[in-house]
Amino acid sequence: MSRLLHTGQVIVDLVMALDTLPATGGDVLAQSASFETGGGFNVMAAARRNGMPVVYLGRHGTGRFGDLARAAMQADGIDMALAPSSGKDTGLCVALTEASTERTFISRLGAEGELSAEDLASVVPCADDYVYVSGYSLLLEGKAQPLIDWLLALPRTIAVVFDPGPLAKGPNSALMVALLPRIDIWTSNGPEALAFTGAADIAQALTDLALHLPADTLLVVRDGPNGCWVGRGAQIEHVPGFMVQAVDSNGAGDAHAGVMIAGLAQGLEPVESARRANAAAALAVTRWGPATAPTGAEVDAFLKP
């Protein structure tokens, strides 16, 4: 059975809900606060809850936050390829969710910010595996080059999934130039696609992405409650979203990505996988917290006529 090998970063979120962010130097009271495992965990949990075996191919620290991260992965049945890193804890992200559901993040990476060639060699990918790559990883000096070298050496039968995140701003860095020809699936939200391409709208961004990527790359670009756009080359379809009462958008995109990959791994066509992913994202925004992806049974029930 196809596995998801996630090479990104699992961190711990300090999630706080508040009416609105204060001005610089201001002070507000939050309605709630909790520590939750997040980052790359959100995608892995979504895929695992929808029937896909998952391996975390990243580091995790020794300390309070590392313990929280490992407990969460173990609870969701996610395998960890590496032993805890000694001398450094897992990183922390302060995730602030306003009443509008808009999110603001402040992160400090820990052990997960490094990855060596020896670490990557600890897992041998199978021919039908999916390897998930985060744009954040390409910004990390202790991780980016070994990761790129490893990805470029993978057999072509292994699908490489790239999530640019909000900080991968364009296609022209040396690392992106090396990685772009190896990307089999692109998954991002609309603003990330616009920032990466410099396009003025999603339609133009989809056209521009197709110019930078191999012709058979599957493009998945999320458009919030409107659903997503999915397809290859000029054959792009809009898959409508679902109307729900959103309370927290944190983790919705990750839920979409994980369920999308799980559907593809189970043999679904891209449009059907996208419909399930849209449903998962809709359910996720009705729940507080980062890792709120539904199970496969919950998605089935949501989609049932």
Image (spheres, grey):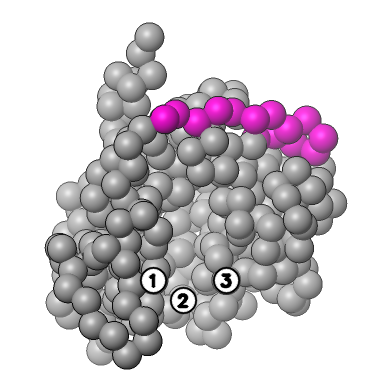
In the rendering, at what x and y percent does residue 89 appear? 25, 81
Element carrying mark 1: strand
* Residue mark closest to the camera, 1 vs 3: 1
Q: Which one is in front, 115 or 301? A: 301
For label 3, count other residues whose C-alpha is less than 10 Å away and answer few (under 14), some (14-19) or many (20+).
few
The disc placed on residue 82 is: none
Element carrying mark 2: loop
Which contiguous range is marked in magenta? 230-243
Q: Which one is in front, 23 or 214? A: 23
Element carrying mark 3: loop
The residue wearing badge 2 is: 115
**Which numbered disc, 2 or 1, marks the residue that appears first in the sequence?**
1
The residue wearing badge 1 is: 105
Within the image, what quadrant is residue 231 found in? top right
Q: Which residue: 57% across, 51% down? A: 189
Residue 275 belongs to magenta span: no
For label 2, count other residues whose C-alpha is less than 10 Å away and answer few (under 14), some (14-19) or many (20+).
many
The disc placed on residue 167 is: 3
* Residue mark closest to the camera, 2 vs 1: 1
**Image mark count:** 3
Label pair 2/3, CB-CB below 8 angstroms: no
How far, Cα to Cα, is label 2 from label 1? 23 Å
Q: Which residue: 68% across, 40% down? A: 218
Q: Which one is in front, 93 or 90? A: 93
Residue 242 belongs to magenta span: yes
Relative horizontal placement of residue 272, taking residue 148 as reference (left or right): left
